[in-house]
Image (cartoon, grey):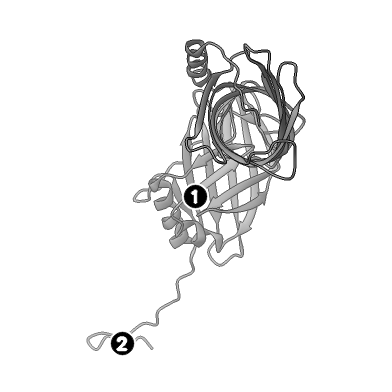
């Protein structure tokens, strides 16, 4: 990596970095999704702190630089595997020239991986990567000296989507590299680097935008609880129903009959326009374990909008799994809903009603008529 850092404007860099974190837009009717998309990124270091330990030199050499619109950039390309893991490769180039007309050209190339923790307009991530690189230092009027290095880097940041296919990506990054192999540089060294970086990314292909469930409910169709039942629960004949209300016209209803092998899960949304037509599955995250459930889509036109229904079947014994879970998240078309303690309590009551209770034999009453 480069031993010299480009100069610049520290105050402007700091102001721009702060403003980037304030750019997260409000939730639109359709949110971006990173799932299965290809990404092309260009990034620029705003600030770098480099500390180098040279063999035979008692003190570490420290350099700082502000590279806003400076003499270096990184270019990366890769693809998201689902909506959490991103795999790619990066080429980093830096160049500098000091007052003595000495020039330094540095490069680094290597793979990296990102773990993304959300999907939508604001996507936080952590990253780790490996680099093999080098630099060519050319003193004024002298011969060039080449150095080869190997290192790793890690850090974290966020993808802030301005549109469905374009994001601004500020991040903090730490790195380490060391000289390897035989080259023209006759002194071993290792370096530690801290950087503040901003990237600009284009996202291509992949899934449809994740729907937003904001806005006021369109009204109608609510399940009325039976007297004495918990909110959202009904019991009709030998069947039982529990509705989990997420607000804003969004709900999930579980329907089952004690003793039957399957139960029905129905996810519904009321809104002014359809957004769920591309959804073919519901994903349950139960204490960190994911399970997909295939669903069918049915739209129903209403006087003031549309009622969208995603419906599928799952094993009835999954009601007990849900009732005994500590953390449950329901994901539909990239939008996630975390179940509240009240929702989990409702699932426990639903499971109790769905469970077939063994019939207890009658006991003889010595003061009344025998039971047999």
Give the number of the disc on residue 328: 1
Foreground pick, 83 / 3: 3
Foreground pick, 276 / 151: 151
Give the number of the disc on residue 364: 2
Foreground pick, 2 / 227: 2
Crowding at label 1, few (<14), some or many (≥20) Cα neighbours within 10 Å?
A: many
Residue at image position (46%, 57%) is: 325
Residue at image position (51%, 10%) is: 12
Q: Do residues under tags 2 and 1 come within 8 Å of each other at their CB atoms?
A: no
Res. 115 in view: no
Q: Is residue 323 above or below residue 330?
A: below
Left or right relative to 334: residue 329: left
Q: Is residue 30 above or below residue 140?
A: below
Crowding at label 2, few (<14), some or many (≥20) Cα neighbours within 10 Å?
A: few
Examine the image and state in which quarter residue 289 appears: bottom right
Label tally: 2
User: Closer to the N terminus: mark 2 or mark 1?
Assistant: 1
Q: Where residue 164 appears, x then y in whole percent?
A: 67, 23
Image depth: mark 2 or mark 1 in front: 1
Give the number of the disc on residue 76: none
| CA distance separating discs 2 and 1 | 46 Å
Q: Where residue 39 appears, x then y in whole percent?
A: 73, 30
Q: Dot 2: what SS?
A: loop
Residue at the left extreme of this rendering: 367
Q: Dot 1: what SS?
A: strand
Q: Where residue 232 appears, x then y in whole percent?
A: 44, 44
Res. 17 in view: yes
Q: Where residue 328 appears, x then y in whole percent?
A: 49, 50
Task: Name the image quarter holding the N terminus.
Answer: top right
């Amino acid at each position: 990596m480069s031993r010299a850092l480009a100069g610049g404007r520290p105050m402007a860099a700091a102001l721009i970095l702060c403003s980037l974190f304030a750019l997260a837009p409000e939730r639109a009717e359709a949110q971006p999704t990173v799932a299965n998309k290809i990404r092309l990124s260009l990034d620029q270091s705003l600030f770098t702190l480099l500390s180098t330990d040279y063999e035979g030199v008692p003190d570490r050499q420290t350099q700082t630089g502000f590279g806003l619109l400076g003499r270096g950039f990184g270019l990366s390309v890769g693809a998201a595997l689902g909506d959490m893991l991103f795999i790619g490769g990066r080429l980093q180039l830096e160049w500098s020239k000091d007052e003595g007309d000495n020039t330094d050209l540095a490069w680094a190339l290597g793979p990296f991986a990102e773990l993304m923790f959300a999907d939508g307009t604001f996507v936080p991530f952590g990253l780790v990567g490996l680099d093999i690189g080098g630099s060519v230092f050319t003193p004024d009027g002298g011969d060039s000296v080449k150095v080869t290095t190997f290192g790793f880097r890690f850090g974290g940041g966020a993808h802030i989507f301005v549109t469905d296919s374009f994001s601004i990506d500020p991040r903090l990054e730490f790195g380490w590299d060391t000289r390897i192999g035989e080259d023209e540089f006759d002194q071993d060294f290792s370096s530690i680097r801290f950087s503040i970086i901003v990237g600009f990314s284009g996202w291509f292909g992949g899934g449809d935008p994740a729907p937003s469930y904001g806005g006021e409910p369109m009204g109608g169709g609510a399940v009325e609880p039976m007297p004495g039942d918990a909110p959202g629960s009904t019991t009709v004949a030998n069947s039982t129903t529990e509705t989990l209300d997420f607000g804003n016209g969004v709900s999930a209803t579980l329907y089952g009959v004690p003793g039957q092998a399957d139960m029905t899960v129905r996810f519904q949304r009321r809104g002014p326009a359809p957004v769920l037509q591309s959804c073919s599955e519901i994903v349950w995250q139960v204490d960190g374990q994911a399970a997909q459930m295939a669903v069918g889509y049915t739209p129903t036109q209403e006087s003031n909008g549309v009622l969208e229904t995603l419906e599928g079947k799952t094993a009835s014994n999954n009601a007990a799994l849900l009732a005994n879970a500590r953390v449950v998240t329901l994901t539909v078309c990239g939008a996630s809903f975390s179940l509240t303690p009240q929702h989990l309590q409702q699932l426990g009551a639903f499971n109790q009603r769905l469970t077939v209770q063994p019939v207890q034999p009658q006991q003889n009453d010595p003061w009344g008529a025998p039971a047999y």
